[in-house]
Amino acid sequence: MENEKKYFFDNPNNVKRLLHIFYGVCVLLFVLDFVIHRHVMHSWENIWGFYPLYGFVGCVVLVLIATWMRTFLMRSEDYYDNEGEADIDEQSASGDSTSKKHNTEVGGHDVDA
Amino acid sequence: MMWMLEIPPFLPFFIGALIAAVTRGTVRNIIMVAIPIVSGLHLWMVPEGVHLQFAFLDYQLVPYRADKLSMMFGYVFHIAAFIGVIYSLHVRDTMQQVAAMMYAGSGLGAIFAGDLLSLFVFWELLAFTSVFLIWARRTQRAYAAGMRYLIIQVLSGVILLAGALFYAAENGTLEFGFIGLDGIAGWLIFIAFGIKCAFPIAHNWLTDAYPEATVTGTVFLSAFTTKVAVYALARGYPGTELLVYIGAAMTCFPIFFAVIENDLRRVLAYSLINQVGFMVVGIGIGTALAINGAVSHAFNDVIFKGLLFMTMGAVLHMTGRINGSDLGGLYKTMPKTTVLCIVGAASISAFPLFSGFVSKSMVMSAAVEEGYDWIWLMLLFASAGVFHHAGIKIPYFAFFAHDSGIRASDPPNNMLLAMTIAAVLCVAIGVYPAALYSLLPYDTGYNPYDATHVLAQTQLLFFSALAFVWLNLKGLYPPELRSTNLDFDWIYRRLAPVALQKTFAVIWLTDEALRQAFLARFDLCLAFISRRHEGVSGLLSRTYPVGSMVMWVSVILAAYLFLSFITH
């Protein structure tokens, strides 16, 4: 892989540039809220920055709750494969045990018959 | 040419399946591509109305009825079949080709069925034909998932049949029109539709089976089954308020599972439920705008969800992997697939100028208009969430993120062509929605492109993306982990079997103990009784004296003698 060609995002500067453009667009969109005359259908929409805030907060909450759900929903990848073994109380929510079957599964599936 | 009208759209597909079963190679490919085109063009010419009906017992059966609602689904099913066939041209597996054609035909049959009995027949055919697309993966997991899928689908059909019989008894007709939630029939049919529509807690057949199907099979699966259910709900239960709440739940809960799911096709399966949720809400609201929104969103969803499943299928086909934890950096060698995936992602996220935007917004507007404030907030949250998991997560973890070192090339040309057709349709519908709107059941004069709405949606999406960037930079974003996440299917895949196992273990043990105890007692009694009668010529004694035996022999002989006298 040493002499592999460099791709666009291999250069951290490109990533940075893209992010800066993205931040710029976000600011612009937020400012537009005050410029464009909006005809709203609902009183909540009158709150300045309602949509940006709702989108941002909604997604952060979504991710935090989903991450928390992992603590009690996550099992090892082959959890259902050893059916019949009554390990109903098995708690394998730790990161180690979830990755132990790493290489046995890859390529094990008949991908496209 | 009148007889041409009477060819129901499922027939060409069933004939196609038959031909596909006995032909090979180029001939088969040509026929499979030609059938959706010819049948689609034919459908375009067909006017609305009842085109085929006959009497069966006391009832009028209508296997072919066309109106605006069924036509809409008819068109998109032809498009989906066409795209799916092109996507799977490289496949050399007769089982899959035949199953795919039969499955598409069954979907069309269900859409144009004008009575509940015909609907039931195609409802079950959908299950029995599609399961082969799962089994065709030929792994143990696929076999088991297919079995669970089949059991649940057939159960839905059986409930539908029961509901149809009740309906016939209550109303004296089998005609499939508005049903509504009064009476047993209404509820039974509602539940049958709900199972196929992946209502909450009946949704796991979808997330369980679709990711286990073959690369091309999943593309077909994503198009037909749930959309047939959406169609059936739109016909039988428009304006049923319960659907608004069920639909809102469907839009919200899957996105949590999608965020932590590793298998990217399972992420798409969860997002499929989320999208169907929007349609169900629209049907529940039931105004002209809402129904239009639901139907057009179903139309668009078939195309953009198909596109997303195709791009992930291409990744699986080329790399042999589909888990987010194994992928990343594929944009370097699969640039075309990357772009096509981003188009699909933008469409499902409802970016302005992409197809999702022009249909989802109708449902949202209808929710506000009808005063469903909280539902509207939930839908807004779900819109942000779908962008998060389908719009960003799918392309990001497959094609960008950390470099997995995999250097797979773009997929075969037929796959690229199918994805390109879908992508072009996504953009075309987004840019020129009037074409789609002209097909809709109602004329509402809706315009999605007013400044307020475009700005609001763009703000929502960009700031959702900002949340993703921020969480990633902070290291708060949950990493992709190899794992199984428990969902409701845990109840029947783990809890119920284990509980039954334990219960029966206890029952067997108790049973055995009881038998042993009884036998022991019985033995004791026998021993006691026989001891009491020892040596006495009683009925219950274990041994008899010789004298009593001699006496009984002489009694028998005397009886013989007597009998021979009276017979002569």
Image (cartoon, rainbow, N blue to C red):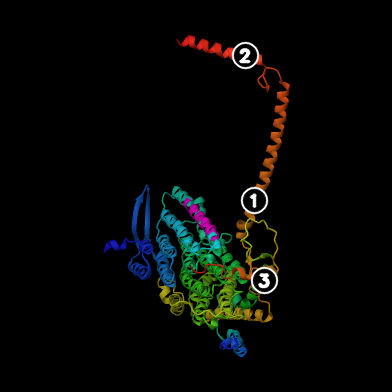
Q: What stretch is highlighted in magenta?
A: B144-161
Tell me how far mark 1 sits from mark 2, CA to CA: 59 Å
Whether tag 3 and tag 2 are in contact, CB under 8 A, the answer is no
Q: What element carries label 1?
A: helix
Magenta segment includes A43: no
Magenta segment includes B154: yes
Front tag of 3 and 2 = 2
Label annotation for residue A67: 3
- What kind of residue is marked 2? Val
Tell me how far mark 3 sits from mark 1, CA to CA: 33 Å
Spot occupied by residue A91 in the image (x, y as percentages of width and height): 70, 63
Identify the image quadrant of residue B402.
bottom right
Q: In this view, does B534 lie above or below B163?
A: above
- Which residue in the structure is indicated by mark 1? B501
Q: Is mark 3 on a helix, strand or loop?
A: helix
Front position in the image: B372 or A94: A94
**Quick one: which residue is furthest to the left in this view?**
B1
- What kind of residue is marked 1? Gln
Front tag of 1 and 2 = 2
Label annotation for residue B550: 2
**Quarter that holds the N terminus of chain B:** bottom left
Identify the image quadrant of residue B77.
bottom left
